[in-house]
Image (cartoon, rainbow, N blue to C red):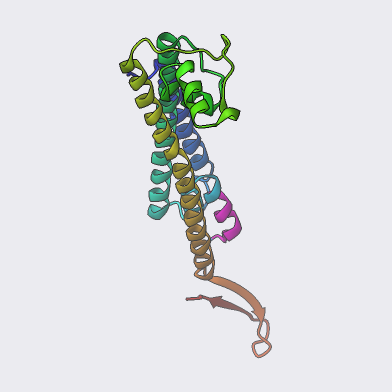
Amino acid sequence: MNQNPISLKASLLKIAALVLSILVFTSVVQAQDTDNREVSPGNALLRSFVMPGWGHHYVDRDNWRRGQYHLAADVILIASYLGFRTHSNVLEQNMYTVASAHSGQDITNRDRAYQLAVGNYHSLAEYNDYQQRTRNLDQLYPNTIEYQWEWDSQQKRQDYGDIRSQWNQTNQQLPALLSLMVVNRIISGLSAFSRARNHNTNIPQISFSHNPYLKGAVQANLLVRW
């Protein structure tokens, strides 16, 4: 089963938009002087939450390799999520198509229980017969056109079940990918926050004061923190 070209094209466009946003974000801070300026740890943290790696670039655009790793991980995770989502949509449509063509019932807008029943039983009569024998009378479906189905072959019912199983497995990957995106942002943000604080403490500070022991003299003090 091939992916829908339209869905695949939409996913590629989303990835292209992501790459473009990365280029825009990084170009905003290209003109900033990173040698002797104070940076805000809070800004570094927030930037990394928006896009992992951006906070590291904000702190030191000449040395943000750690941020590049976080950025690359985020791009991979987003691309994987879009790929799984596209594949899930394709499987779902294939599942509906097989059911409609070979069971005689459109299950597109039906609940999960009904979709499972269609896959587990050859027909509505077989399903209701089993529920009556097991005394599950509250799970009976009315014998009307809206609920009737009957598979034209056992193989097609098996194909439907296989597609549905793949669809469920694909959907189970999506929350894990979203969680990894959140974790990557948190780790990137904390790292950028720490780097910003260290950056500020290492900036030489120069102050001027009047020396009372030297008439007309101004004393310059240089403070370097390690």
Query: Residue 98, relative to residue 208: is it above or below?
Result: above
Span highlighted in magenta in the image: 37-47
Q: Residue at x 65, y 90 (%)?
A: 213
Inspect this view and state whether residue 34 appears: no
- Give the image quarter of residue 78: top left
- Say which of 186 and 210 sits in front: 186
Residue 214 at x, y percent in the picture: 64, 87
Q: Residue at x 43, y 43 (%)?
A: 74
- Say which of 31 and 140 sits in front: 140
- Give the image quarter of residue 111: top right
Query: Residue 199, relative to residue 168: is it above or below?
Result: below
- Say which of 7 and 157 sits in front: 157
Inspect this view and state whether residue 126 appears: yes
State left or right for residue 30 relative to residue 215.
left
- Membership of 42 in magenta stretch: yes
Residue 153 at x, y percent in the picture: 33, 12
State left or right for residue 114 relative to residue 72.
right
